[in-house]
């Protein structure tokens, strides 16, 4: 167990090192800079140079890199180049909102998608299946931000629901009210994706010999479904849930824009446009960490469910 | 009626016994479209129509998509301006027609490019194994761990918003998908007799990959490509929606939707129309992909 966590930690460090180094250098290679972004295209070269010096951007790039690494080792992501606030504080203040949104959408997507997929597989080629498949193809074609716009137009505006902002976690009612539509917008697309995956997994398992044997032995249909189809068939859903969570974190960027929710997405987009190097680096490092940890959790959960993979 | 099909596929993979062998045994048989299904036809028609619109926008509208008329801002639909005008008094219908170009060009070319890079990379990893495989698949895993949209966003924000940059930005997220999908089957095919015997006959790796392994992947890859085009179109629209697509005044569906959301309450048509356009384009590619899968692989057709 200790070795497992050591290996996991090593992988996290390696990935973080590669990703943060790549971002650090790529972002500095690009045209424009925070000074130009702040002062405008027509700023005098003199003013730009002075601001760059103040921001520490005239130091040799390897010195900057060394400073970045030593700070990072202490868990310090540096200060924002635009407002001087510690990047980690800014990120921690918005990250819970993004994660909350992604988790809420994941729950909607998994509940809806897996139920729909099972129904389709059980009633294969009959009307629930045909209708479900057409619906999932349609759902899969909707960009989540357009779903969000539709929800605002046809649900939030007529019913007078709030369409922007977030509420603190302490005000549960208001918080849930504000997360419902954004989560639904992302969840509908996720439902479509997961129902297709679940359907094909279940259809495959239903066709296997052990299911036929169980039926031949006279096992009741309900028990066949739960014990012989769902249990083995749902195993691959674990890694797929991990994948869909990652997609949802990406989708959150768009949805946060529609609902004017503060979050990692809007923070990152604004920081990129302002060439706020430290904030962009910080966001990418945090996103990478979240992704690596989610993947590790998915891995661990998979091992628990399927002992056959333990040796691998 | 398809119970024998897995058997037929196996015989089709037997190495060529020489020219003029029986039809079933001569090289990996190109799977024909076994039947035209409604999904395939509808999807194909939608895509054909959109390609036509993208190629010849002036056949559908004679107006200038960038022409502003600040005296007629947000004008409701009329006989002259079927879908009304936007916040600069530009004709929404004309911009919708011209916006087809950005979506189709960027969406389709990023899929083709992603496939052209990803499939060979995945096949190389699967065929050579060893260190090559480990390095390639590690990079693929790292890239796949990131949401495609965030990769694209980062790239565009850093390198700028030209057609080429946006396409590349999307390609970065698409390459690993194709590499991963080509890798698995290649692993399996390299152990098959028809590949082994080809090696014995002195064939070199590029020949084997191109002549023996690629034909076996082709059908699946075409299906995936079509489904992926639905994804890339949505990523392009997402970038434009965030203001990171083709810069104004170029008409893009995502950009129009972004503009429209400001006037959602007073002028819903403004955002509904471009949103529906993105949806229809993505639906077309999804239907086409699903239909092709059924048509190419009769085993799933009856599923």
Image (cartoon, rainbow, N blue to C red):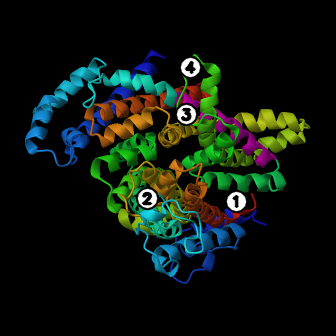
Q: Nearer the viewer, mark 4 or mark 1?
A: 4
Q: Is residue B287 left or right of residue A58?
A: right
Residue A94 falls left or right of residue A128:
left
The numbered mark 3 sits on a residue in which chain? Answer: A
Label 4, label 2: how far apart the Cα atoms are: 46 Å
Look at mark 2 in the image and give the residue it sits on.
Answer: B119
Q: Nearer the viewer, residue B279 or B92?
A: B92
Q: How many marks?
A: 4
Q: Position of residue A36 (x, y in %)?
A: 20, 43
Q: Quadrant of the C terminus of chain B?
A: bottom right
Q: Position of residue B125 (x, y in %)?
A: 39, 51
- Same-chain status of marks 1 and 2: yes
Q: Check the image and name the residue furthest to the left.
A: A46
Most distant residue in the front direction: B71
Check disc 3: other Cα within 10 Å, few if <14, some if 14-19, many if 20+.
many
Looking at the magenta stretch, what is its main secondary structure? helix
User: Which element type, helix, strand or loop, lies under badge 2?
Assistant: helix
Mark 4–mark 2 contact, CB under 8 Å?
no
Callouts 4 and 1 on one subunit: no
């Amino acid at each position: 167990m200790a070795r497992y966590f050591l290996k996991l930690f090593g992988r996290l460090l390696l990935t973080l090192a590669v990703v943060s180094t790549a971002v650090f250098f790529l972002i500095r290679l690009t045209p424009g800079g925070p000074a130009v972004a702040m002062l405008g295209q027509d700023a005098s070269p003199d003013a730009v140079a002075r601001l760059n010096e103040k921001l520490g951007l005239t130091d040799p790039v390897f010195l900057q890199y060394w400073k970045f690494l030593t700070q990072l080792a202490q868990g310090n992501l540096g200060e924002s180049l635009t407002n001087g606030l510690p990047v980690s504080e800014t990120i921690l203040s918005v990250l819970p909102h993004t994660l909350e949104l992604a988790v809420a959408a994941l729950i909607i997507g998994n509940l809806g998608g897996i139920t729909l997929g099972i129904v389709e597989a059980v009633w294969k080629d009959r009307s629930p299946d045909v209708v479900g498949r057409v619906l999932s193809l349609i759902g899969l074609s909707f960009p989540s931000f357009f779903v969000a716009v539709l929800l605002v137009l046809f649900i939030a505006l007529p019913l007078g629901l709030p369409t922007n902002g977030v509420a603190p976690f302490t005000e549960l009612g208001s918080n849930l009210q504000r997360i419902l539509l954004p989560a639904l917008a992302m969840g509908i697309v996720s439902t479509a994706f997961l129902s297709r995956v679940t359907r094909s997994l279940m259809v495959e398992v239903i066709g296997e010999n052990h299911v036929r044997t169980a039926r031949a032995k006279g096992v009741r249909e309900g028990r066949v479904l739960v014990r012989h189809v769902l249990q083995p068939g749902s195993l691959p859903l674990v890694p797929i849930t991990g994948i869909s969570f990652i997609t949802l974190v990406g989708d959150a960027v768009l949805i946060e824009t529609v609902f004017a929710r503060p979050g990692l997405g809007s923070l990152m987009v604004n920081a990129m446009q302002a060439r706020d190097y430290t904030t962009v680096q910080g966001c990418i490092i945090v996103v990478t960490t979240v992704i690596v940890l989610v993947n590790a959790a998915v891995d661990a959960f998979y091992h628990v469910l399927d002992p056959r993979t333990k040796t691998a | 009626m398809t119970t024998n099909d897995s058997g037929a596929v196996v015989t089709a993979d037997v190495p060529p016994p020489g020219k003029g062998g029986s039809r079933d045994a001569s090289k990996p048989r190109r799977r024909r479209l076994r039947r035209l299904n409604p999904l395939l036809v509808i999807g194909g028609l939608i895509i054909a129509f959109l390609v036509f619109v993208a190629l010849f926008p002036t056949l559908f509208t004679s107006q200038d998509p960038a022409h502003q008329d600040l005296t007629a801002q947000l004008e409701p639909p009329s006989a002259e301006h079927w879908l009304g005008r936007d916040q600069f008094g530009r004709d929404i219908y004309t911009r919708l027609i011209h916006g087809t170009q950005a979506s189709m060009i960027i969406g389709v070319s990023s899929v083709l490019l992603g496939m052209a890079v990803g499939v060979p990379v995945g096949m190389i990893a699967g065929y050579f194994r060893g260190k090559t495989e480990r390095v390639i698949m590690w990079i693929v895993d790292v890239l796949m761990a990131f949401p495609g949209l965030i990769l694209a966003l980062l790239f565009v924000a850093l390198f700028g918003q030209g057609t080429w940059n946006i396409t590349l930005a999307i390609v970065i997220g698409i390459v690993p998908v194709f590499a991963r999908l080509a890798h698995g089957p290649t692993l399996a095919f390299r152990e098959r007799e028809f590949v082994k015997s080809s090696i014995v006959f002195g064939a070199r790796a590029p020949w084997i990959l191109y002549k023996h392994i690629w034909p076996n992947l082709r059908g699946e890859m075409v299906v995936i490509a079509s489904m992926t085009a639905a994804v890339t179109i949505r990523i392009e629209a997402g970038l434009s929606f965030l203001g990171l697509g083709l810069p104004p005044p170029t008409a893009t569906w995502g950009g129009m939707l972004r503009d429209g959301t400001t006037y959602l309450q007073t002028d819903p048509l403004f955002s509904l129309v471009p949103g529906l356009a993105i949806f229809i384009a993505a639906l077309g590619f999804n239907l086409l992909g699903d239909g092709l899968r059924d048509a190419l692989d009769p085993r799933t057709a009856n599923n």
